[in-house]
Image (spheres, helix red, strand yellow):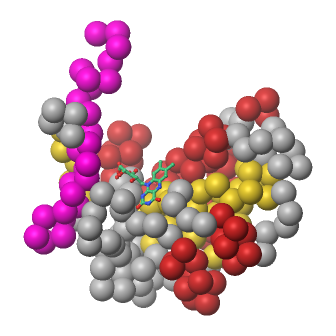
Amino acid sequence: MLYDLLYKARSYRNFDPSFKYTADDMKELINLCRFTPSTANTQSVKFAYACDEELCSKIFPLLGWAGYLTEKPPYDGNVPSAYILLCCDLNITDKPIEIDVGICAQTLVLGAMEKGIGACMIGSFNKEIMSSVFSLPEKLYPRLIIALGRPNEKIVLKDAIDGNIKYYRDENKTHYVPKRPLDEILITK
Ligand SMILES: Cc1cc2nc3c(=O)[nH]c(=O)nc-3n(C[C@H](O)[C@H](O)[C@H](O)COP(=O)(O)O)c2cc1C
């Protein structure tokens, strides 16, 4: 059921580092995005990926993890096994279409989770350095990167109380994610 898949598809930030993915695994995931809707059917989101250790090790230090936490994941070398970089092709549209990036990103996260692959969308990275690490052609603007791997942490969803939406970890490093109750997001009651 979509409910169960969405419930499981948390932002994972700790992964089993021994897990490896192939270029074919990455291409199978990215292929899902061909069938997503896009503004005026422009399909301006383009994808680069990394699943070899050398490239992954260059990407990892560029990423800003878990802004609300003081002790930053991933812990104990639980690094991602692969990444997919979502870029806006500015040859197709004159400015990035953020909504289309979002639709593709969630499609990748759900497609990955369906296969037991955990993911975390990361918007916090230096765009220029990321472009050079991936040797991106001119006019390809990197907007979001998705870290991927076999999940290696416990994440618990909770109802947000009094509008407090900051995620947190307990002493066992279990990650808690407060979600606003349905009543709070309904405008039409
Ligand atoms: C557009 C976008 C950008 C994000 N950027 C980051 C990021 O830079 N670093 C990070 O650790 N998490 C990032 N996240 C993950 C959010 O923190 C996460 O979705 C939120 O805490 C809720 O957790 P959940 O995805 O498990 O529901 C991002 C999520 C989205 C949708």
Q: Give x and y (percent) for residue 76.
A: 30, 85
Q: Give x and y (percent) for residue 32.
A: 65, 51
Which residue is at 55% across, 85% downward? Answer: 57
**Observer able to see residue 130:** yes
Towards the viewer: 16 or 64 = 64
The residues colored magenta run: 165-189
Residue 141 relative to residue 62: left or right: right
Which residue is at 53% across, 57% downward? Answer: 123
Which residue is at 46% across, 56% downward? Answer: 114
Residue 74 relative to residue 104: left or right: left
Query: How many labels, in total?
Result: 0
**Vertical placement of residue 74 versus 8, above or below:** below
Q: Give x and y (percent) for residue 174.
A: 18, 65
**Observer able to see residue 24:** no
Which residue is at 66% across, 64% downward? Answer: 127
Towards the viewer: 36 or 131 = 131
Q: Give x and y (percent) for residue 152.
A: 31, 73
